[in-house]
Amino acid sequence: MLKLHPNYGFNTLAVHSGSAPDPATGARTFPIYQTAAYVFDDADHAASLYNLQSPGFIYSRLSNPTVAALEEKLATLEGGRGGTATSSGHAAEIIALFPLMAPGMEVIVADKLYGGTINLMGKSFQKFGWKAIFVDTEDPESFQSAITDKTRAIFIENLANPGGIVTDLEEIVKIANGAGVPLIVDNTLATPFLSQPLEWGADIVVHSTTKYLSGQGNALGGIVIDSGNFPWLGNPKYPSLSSPSAEYNGLIFSETFGDLAYTMYNHAVSLRDLGCTQSPMNAWLTLNGVETLPLRMERHCSNGLAMAEFLEKHQNVEWVSHAGLKSSPYFKLGKKYFPNGTGSLFSFGVKGGYESGIKLLESVELFSHVANLGDTRSLILHPSSTTHRQLTKDQQIASGAGPEVVRLSVGIECVEDLIADIDQALNNLR
Amino acid sequence: MPDSFIVNHDNYTDNYIRDILRSVHSIAIVGASINWKRPSNFVMKYLIQKGYRVIPVNKNSVGDQIYGQNIYPDLSSVKETVDMVDIFRPSKEAPQLVENSILIGVKVFWMQLELRNDRAAKIAEDAGVKVVMNRCPKIEYARLFGELGWSGFNTGVISVKKRRT
Ligand SMILES: Cc1ncc(COP(=O)(O)O)c(C=O)c1O
């Protein structure tokens, strides 16, 4: 694990970083600044803020005190230089790429991803003229052969959807370094408690904070975290950061802000213009959520693994895909990149196919039938009858969502209660 | 040389930087630009706002002023006490600038982002002058005294005290 702070460890930082007592009131829990705009001291102060000569608040589309507290907390926990919070995980993916891409440019994207990300990058990005080149998560060589002079970034999930898949991060880092492009890692399923992609040499981390970070299924949000290590200065591939910015009087972000450049740009340009800012209320819920992240993740991981081990032995289960199982092809990579556990999202195949899948989710009593993950509550999903139902059967199978597939996001309840519930539902199938 | 003086120039402690920023009052900026869009001009404006006395030095702009301060051609021409020198000049000029700084009795020699010269640092430290390299005093001030957190940056500052505003 990265050394995040000279004096303090992860759990201490999860509680304290970013959220010191409110400087205005001394309020101990960081307050919700439910505020849109901030007064200027005088005309010169206003000019300093607009010219980016001084840090400060202008308008909450660009930055807000509560949102900034969350940004600092998560940047700290990932070992990054700075963070940009967004309205959702999807918005984080767009904001992460915004300083890097331009019409006609390409991003190399791993194929084992949250389905929504595949849609966003494969289809909607075309409207920006951004081209996503999909490659095989499990085959680093496929990343290498997709590199062109138009490549501007590589995007992967670390612990990948639909659960149980581990990406060989070090191999992809080598390819990104060789190509001179930043590697962006979606660390949603692992959280910084289980893995810090920057430690392995990734450049940028994104999250859907909607999941384990907020942790209770109550706040949409996302974040982009920058390592501060990528050499933007003088780099012609990234003119947003390396050439004079007309709207800021010819300022060059990488020259004026050094290793803060990418995060400065994301507030001063990306959020200012695209407007997909996180709300103070959601940032506040997530700030509180992150304080208990270490405790929750330990329980999520132990419950998830116990459930996977139970299912693997059940007569009505065909297979279980969980990187913590010795039978998993990802077991070794899992131990390397996720020594403290591989999360609680995984899938399994139920005997009897589609009908059994439907019957199972109708007979469980503690698992909520929900298209989400990373909640305190245990969640169950049958992709082929919900998220993947528009696809043909062949497409479903190719994307890991065949008729027999059931996905679980195991919560933090008593694991024996969860196992008993799944057991009765599985036994009920015959 | 006392132990406390051995500084790791790859990784300064927050206390080292904080002590410097708290102890100096007057700062000469070598390479200060009259063009308000340049980083040196940003730094000057910010440090003045924070209450420092800032003295611009730039041999190409003698006779001009920046934020009401006369520009000096070189450090030896400055007619007042200088606590710290901050340079916006290429690293290779640092040894000479250190010599000039020692002559006028500065306590801190600071080199901006992307600048580093270990030979210059050694000369300065042997003369009892503290050195900071590859950092920006504006960013460090903002980071250590709370303002950088406003922009979502990792300040490394952990505190259970109410910060003075
Ligand atoms: C790995 C991953 N990335 C991104 C997203 C998108 O995040 P959001 O729903 O917050 O937009 C999700 C889930 O929805 C996800 O699971």
Image (cartoon, helix red, strand yellow):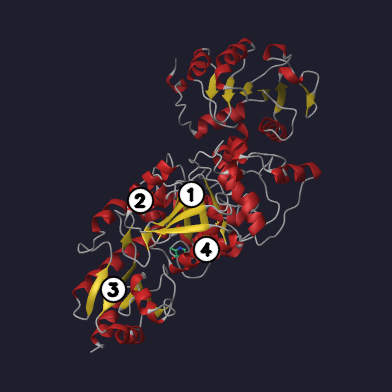
Q: Is residue A35 above or below residue A80?
A: below
Residue in the foreground of this view, choosing between A338 and A96: A96
Tell me what residue is drawn at x 53 percent, y 53 percent: A96
Among numbered discs 3 and 2, the one appearing first in the sequence: 2
Chain ID at mark 4: A
Q: Amino acid at mark 1?
A: Thr
Q: Which residue position is annotated with label 4?
A: A90
Q: Which residue position is annotated with label 2?
A: A169
Camera-side mark, 1 or 3: 1
Labels 4 and 3 share a subunit: yes
Chain ID at mark 1: A
Residue A95 is situated, as x and y percent measured from the top left of the image, at 56, 56
Residue in the foreground of this view, choosing between A178 and B44: A178
Among numbered discs 4 and 3, the one appearing first in the sequence: 4
Tell me what residue is drawn at x 62 percent, y 53 percent: A270
Badge 1 element: strand
Residue B84 in view (yes/no): yes
Q: Which mark is residue A348?
A: 3
Q: Which residue position is annotated with label 1?
A: A151
A160 to the left or right of B143: left
Q: Residues within 10 Å of mark 3 (few under 14, many from 20)?
A: many
Asked if disc 4 is less than 8 Å from ligand 1, the answer is yes
Asked if disc 1 is less than 8 Å from ligand 1, the answer is no
Of the 4 image quadrants, the one containing the C terminus of chain A is: bottom left
Q: Residue furthest top?
A: B103
Contact between marks 2 and 4 (CB within 8 A): the answer is: no
Chain ID at mark 2: A
Labels 1 and 3 share a subunit: yes
